[in-house]
Amino acid sequence: EAGVAQSPRYKIIEKRQSVAFWCNPISGHATLYWYQQILGQGPKLLIQFQNNGVVDDSQLPKDRFSAERLKGVDSTLKIQPAKLEDSAVYLCASSLDPGQGAYEQYFGPGTRLTVT
Amino acid sequence: AQSVTQLGSHVSVSEGALVLLRCNYSSSVPPYLFWYVQYPNQGLQLLLKYTTGATLVKGINGFEAEFKKSETSFHLTKPSAHMSDAAEYFCAVSGGGKLIFGQGTELSVKP
């Protein structure tokens, strides 16, 4: 079974530029998550999708971050414009429906973003 | 609100020694608890999880953890450390599907 795929693996941009990250979850997983992991900290949830609807985006800085999950499969996370403090690893995870008791999340390898 | 506290940001053990990584949680509802491991430049891999039932849970690579409700703890142990266990370990509690992570504990294993 293929795991969660993410691209690119690494990205370096200058502040005020824009960047986009892509995630392909495990086939059949209804729920998709984007986490931000700042160096030395645990991952923090940015947004949770159930199929193509948003369940939780309370921690997403909506003035600069946006995310979509068209057709309930792949997802894209965008930052525009980027700030220095956005330097982090962006992790995508997927799971079966937590509402059905499936709480185990599977993580992709992450995208390491450096903003200079 | 739910939260997780991992005691000790760095733990160093000798190869063959006991590994003990501490995790305490706060939750207003019965918690679902997880330990994940992260190797350099990789995503997180699930080691083990507690949902309901037996409070001693066994995971991959010889790790286990015990859920102690009275102590609000979910400490991770391994009887004998191996060099390949060197990594970052995260404890997490599940709230509404999303995971709330601790700060992480970096485990170093000395030969």
Image (tube, rainbow, N blue to C red):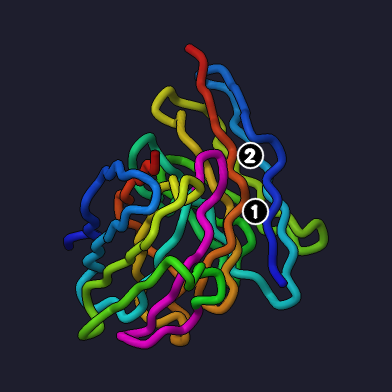
Looking at the image, which is closer to me, A26 or B84?
A: A26
Looking at the image, which is closer to me, A25 or B108?
A: A25
Magenta stretch encompasses residue A45:
yes
What is the quadrant of residue B85 in the picture? top left
- Left or right: where A74 falls relative to A15: left
Look at the numbered discs 2 and 1 and tell me whether their residues touch, using CB distance below 8 Å. Answer: no
- The residue lying at 36 percent from left, 62 percent from top is A80
x, y (%) of residue A17? 32, 53
x, y (%) of residue A60? 50, 69
- The residue lying at 42 percent from left, 23 percent from top is B83
Disc 2 target residue = B21
- Relative to A13, is B18 above or below? above
- Indicate the amino acid at tag 1: Glu
- The residue lying at 69 percent from left, 62 percent from top is B3
x, y (%) of residue B41? 34, 38
Disc 1 target residue = B66
- Relative to B36, is A59 above or below? below
What is the quadrant of residue A18 in the picture? bottom left
- Left or right: where B16 falls relative to A66: right
Looking at the image, which is closer to me, A53 or B66?
A: A53
Q: Quarter of the image containing the N terminus of chain B? A: bottom right
State which region is magenta: A38-56
The crowding category of the residue bearing disc 2, from other C-alpha atoms within 10 Å (few below 14, some 14 to 19, many at least 20), is many
